[in-house]
């Protein structure tokens, strides 16, 4: 009987141990290596250009932040983003995204619970990502739900991140 109780306890606690190990691996700062989208026509493209830039941070207390940009963005003609000409501001806004909030990790999914974002429409959203791969050095996340971007339907997006040491 004692054996059965120990067996049941280990079976019930195993998912929590696995979850804790995954969270420990996830915590830290990650640098964007590549970002690819697959369109509804099956085309694969660089979603943030050939040399994307970005950082993704997860804290042990359940907070996250992300910023992604096209590589090689042009600086504004003035250092004041309010006074910069409207076309320059529009280009700068269209070539980046940033958001932060809480996150939850459950199985192979991490959900970003957006509290603040460069895109006001994202505030309050729950952005679900599938964890395709996670180890001490590399994180691969997939945005699996289709969405509209630049007038085309994106079927999925896969982002590859490298752990910053």
Image (tube, helix red, strand yellow):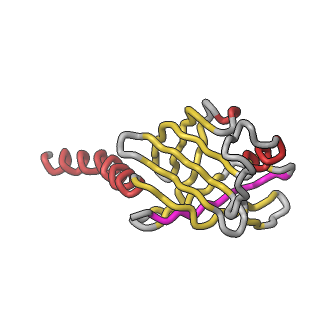
44 vs 59: above or below: below
* In this picture, residue 30 sits left or right of residue 5: right
- Residue at point 30% right, 45% down? 12
* In this picture, residue 27 sits left or right of residue 7: right
Q: How many marks?
A: 0
* In this picture, residue 30 sits left or right of residue 136: right
Q: Residue furthest front?
A: 78
> Horizontal and vertical percent for residue 108?
50, 53
- Residue at point 46% right, 62% down? 134
Q: From which residue to which does the magenta span run?
A: 152-163
48 vs 117: above or below: below
Viewer-side residue, 93 vs 144: 93
* In this picture, residue 58 sits left or right of residue 6: right
141 vs 127: above or below: below
- Residue at point 66% right, 55% down? 69
Viewer-side residue, 89 vs 109: 89
> Horizontal and vertical percent for residue 126?
59, 37
Q: Residue furthest top?
A: 124
The answer to whether residue 45 is magenta is no
> Horizontal and vertical percent for residue 5?
19, 45
Viewer-side residue, 78 vs 61: 78
Viewer-side residue, 12 vs 150: 150
- Residue at point 34% right, 55% down? 21
> Horizontal and vertical percent for residue 40?
82, 57
The secondary structure that dominates the magenta segment is strand
Which quarter of the figure is the C terminus placed in? bottom left
């Amino acid at each position: 009987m004692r054996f059965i109780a120990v067996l049941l306890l280990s079976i019930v606690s195993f998912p929590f141990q696995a979850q804790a190990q995954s969270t420990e691996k996830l915590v830290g700062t990650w640098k964007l290596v590549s970002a690819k989208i697959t369109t509804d026509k099956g085309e694969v493209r660089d979603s943030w250009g050939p040399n994307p830039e970005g950082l993704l941070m997860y804290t042990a207390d359940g907070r996250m932040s992300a910023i992604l940009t096209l590589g090689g963005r042009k600086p504004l003609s003035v250092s004041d983003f309010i006074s910069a000409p409207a076309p320059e501001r529009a280009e700068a806004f269209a070539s980046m995204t940033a958001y932060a909030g809480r996150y939850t990790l459950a199985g192979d999914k991490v959900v970003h619970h957006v509290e603040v974002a460069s895109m006001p429409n994202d505030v309050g959203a729950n952005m679900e990502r599938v964890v395709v791969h996670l180890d001490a050095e590399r994180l691969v996340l997939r945005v699996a739900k289709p969405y509209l971007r630049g007038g085309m339907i994106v079927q999925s997006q896969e982002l590859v991140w490298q752990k910053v040491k």
